[in-house]
Image (cartoon, rainbow, N blue to C red):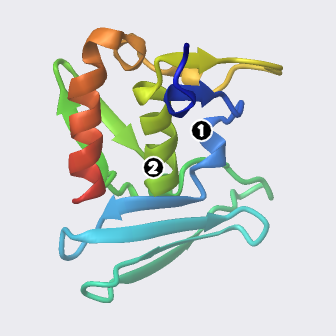
Amino acid sequence: MTNQSNRFHNENLTLSDFYKEVLVVCLACQKKAIAKVNFETFLARLFCTHCGYNKECSTKLVKNGSIETAANYYFNAELWLKAPFKNDVFWAYNDDHLTYLEGYINASLREHKNRSGFTLLEKLPKFYHEAKNRDALLKIIAKLKNK
């Protein structure tokens, strides 16, 4: 019988569901900062609660368009939640993204229902899916949660 706590229900989320608020390395003090983007107002902001660094920029392009991408992109800021894994890098945009990946990696039963396109999970590198990597990836996640 399957343990309900070890079951993962794919919510059909994509990376765009997580990239409006991204944890980054502060450009000034190298501690944890937050990059946020608001596509309605065409503004991106990076703010550090440690040193007070604050930078804002427009996401608007010259011809009234906007690139909708992860908040860290606008500042060329390094992701805070990342760690090496073999010849790859494990990463997440924020705590919600990390928790979602943790649930998927930890699950022995992964359910994918009512898919309407390519989800975040389908685009993950192979090493995220392999059971042989489960324990090592969960250790990385635990370290990132405490970073």
Q: Position of residue 91 (x, y in %)?
A: 35, 39
Q: Are marks 2 and 1 in contact (CB under 8 Å)?
A: yes
Question: Would you say residue 120 is visible in this rendering?
Answer: no
Amino acid type indicated by mark 2? Tyr
Foreground of the two, 111 or 137 = 111
Q: Is 38 on the left-hand or right-hand side of 141?
A: right
Amino acid type indicated by mark 1? Leu
Q: Is 98 on the left-hand or right-hand side of 87?
A: right
Question: Would you say residue 92 is visible in this rendering?
Answer: yes
Determine which residue is flagged by label 1: 15
46 in relation to 63, above or below: below
Determine which residue is flagged by label 2: 93
- Check disc 2: other Cα within 10 Å, few if <14, some if 14-19, many if 20+: many
Q: Position of residue 43 (x, y in %)?
A: 64, 71
Instruction: Give the secondary structure at mark 1.
Output: helix
Quarter of the view holding residue 118 = top right
Please state, as top left, top right, bottom left or bottom right, where the C terminus lies in the image.
Answer: bottom left
- Check disc 1: other Cα within 10 Å, few if <14, some if 14-19, many if 20+: some
Instruction: Give the secondary structure at mark 2.
Output: loop
Foreground of the two, 43 or 105 = 105
Give the distance between the C-alpha atoms of the residues marked 2 and 1, in whole angstroms. 9 Å
142 in relation to 31, above or below: above
Q: Residue at x 59, y 38 (%)?
A: 15
Q: Is 22 on the left-hand or right-hand side of 88?
A: right
Q: Position of residue 127 (x, y in %)?
A: 34, 14
Q: Residue at x 71, y 67 (%)?
A: 42
Which residue, as the protein is rendered here, is positioned at the far bottom? 52
Q: Position of residue 115 (x, y in %)?
A: 79, 19
102 in relation to 72, above or below: above
Q: Residue at x 30, y 21 (%)?
A: 134
Which mark, residue 56?
A: none
Mark earlier in primary sequence (2, 1): 1
